[in-house]
Amino acid sequence: MNRPNPLFRNLNSKIASLPMVFIVLFVFVGGTFWTVAVSFTSVKTLPIFTPMEFYDAFVGIAQYQRLWRSARWMISIINLGIYGSLYTIFAFVIGFWLAVLMDQKIRLEGVFRTIYLYPFALSLIVTGHVWAWILNPAFGIEGTVRGMGWTSFSFDWLTNREMSIYAVVIAGLWQGTGLVMALMLAGLRGIDDEIWRAARIDGIPKWRTYIQVILPMMRPVLITTFVIVASGAVRVYDLVVALTQGGPGLSSQVPTIYVYETMFVGALAQGTAASSIMLLATAIILIPWVMVEFGKRKQG
Amino acid sequence: MANTDTIAVEPFGRKPRPLFAPSRVIIYAALIITSIYYLVPLYVMIITSLKDLDSIRDGNIFIPTSNPTFAPWVKAWSEACTGLKCSGLAPGFWNSVKITIPSVIVSIAVASVSGYSLANWPFKFAEFFFTVLLVGSFIPYQVMLYPLVIITREMGIYSTLWAVIFVHTVFGLPILTLLFRNYFASLPPELFKAARVDGAGYWRIFFQVMMPMSVPIFTVAVILQVTGIWNDFLFGVIYAGPTNYPMTVQLNNIVNSLQGVKEYNVDMAATILTGLVPLTIYFVSGKYFVRGIAAGAVKG
């Protein structure tokens, strides 16, 4: 019997999936490997491809040494640490708190949800410019409070080197907590009513049930939300560009700006080294998610 | 009033609660106070855009003007300057339309077909590619920025509309494919089997069986993509080329333009105008929007 070539079985499906396969291979896998490989070379502007070119331009970890000696990069990394941790912690605390409030069988739930979530529909550029206006020292909150007679009032985070990154956190939280609230609320609604009944019969106060019973049960939701929020924080770019432009001075620089301002201006390998560090940071954030997914497969 | 709490059997239904019980009052107070925090930026944005420059200088940022004017809106739309050009936001708006419509169509076409292949016509390694794609969606964009410059340059489309469309298709693919794959997998398999028995092939089943049943998920995908692409800044800056800069980039250039007197009212009008499209979509389609953003967190 003449068996058909297995390569042609399901042919239409394979043809239709070609764009996906190409994007996976050439952009996600190929692009990532290329970027990491270039970070070990001395390439300045012209990209390289062949093994021979890579061999000739190879400089080991020199780009990384240069990176960690750069004052600007150090500021960027410290700022990412501040922004990433504060943003993630507060987004979780506020988001969970709002979700719990929304879960109290309240009236007008739809209205409140719409209000908390609408900033998430706006772009980070819009968010940045609105907050730049509200935090404007002359005409914003500071100017307004001073105009009301309290002349020593100070809220100058946008022009204060010590505080500029915290202004980014405030604007970021305004835009992003609605998402956390929505995801947490979905998680809360997935909890079985029996749990609540059992907790009530045992006489556990409501707030303790939330923290000691419900929160641990929501672990999968918490982990995916954490991965989404934290990996999003690593990518912060538009918001800083719109709100502070990385200033005043270098005080609110972040790694994405460093990448952008090296990669396209004749320090390609330096830019790829910086983006490889961002990749590493994301990989660390992804570990809990991968463990959960892997654990699920093992059980199932 | 009789106290029924001592009876061991739980009463059915919702516990009747007075509207003004102390715990309720606290909950509503908390909800309303947080709502104010979320609404203030929108409010400030709107009232600032309706003031003239004098009332901005003398006035309070939180108090609306007594004689509102739409002149800042007109100026933001058609006259505001970015550097030497003074054509307002309008060209950016039309560029965003030109970028968004084809990007939404192409990305959804590619992703829906890929999701359909994964759910109904799986081939060898299909799930593997998909897993790589999902993990890849967490990789910071900065890692793939330069490879995508090279790829689009090799395709001969760098710095054109097509390059941005391509890039939006690439980065929309993971979440959209997940969305469609899970949706198609949730449809009753009998429908697919019956169509196969009747002799329908890959494309015919897709267009005549699957698509008509998938209007909700296509709606979710369109909303997700229109808001996401409209709000994009980074890809527009890098791949579109200066003549095709989308609205977000134009807004940023207008607000950061250093020429002449700083017109905060025009800046705020421009900011609202840029946020208007995603905001309208959000307010009109609340439920679908929430479903779209939650899709990323609910893994299949």
Image (cartoon, helix red, strand yellow):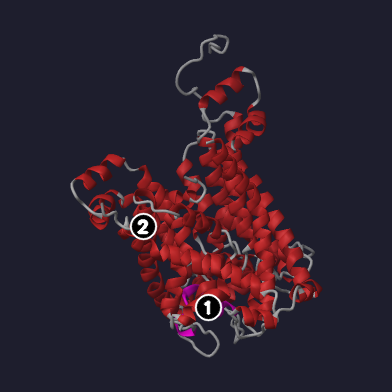
User: Helix, strand or loop at disc 1?
Assistant: helix
Q: Estimate the x, y position of residue B118 in percent, counting from the top left.
A: 39, 52
User: Helix, strand or loop at disc 2?
Assistant: helix
Q: Residue at x 58, y 41 (%)?
A: A220
Q: Is residue A238 left or right of residue A61?
A: left
Q: Camera-side residue: A20 or B145?
A: A20
Q: Are marks 1 and 2 on the same chain?
A: yes
> Residue B15, can we see it?
yes
The disc labelled 1 sits on which kind of residue? Answer: Val
Q: Is residue B249 magenta?
A: yes
Q: Residue at x 42, y 62 (%)?
A: B225
Judging by the rendered image, the residue that carries numbered circle 2 is B112
Magenta span: B242-256
Judging by the rendered image, the residue that carries numbered circle 1 is B149
Dominant SS of magenta comes to: helix
Q: Estimate the x, y position of residue B4 in percent, counting from the top left.
A: 54, 12
Q: Is residue B230 magenta?
A: no
> Residue A129, can we see it?
no
Q: Residue at x 56, y 63 (%)?
A: B44
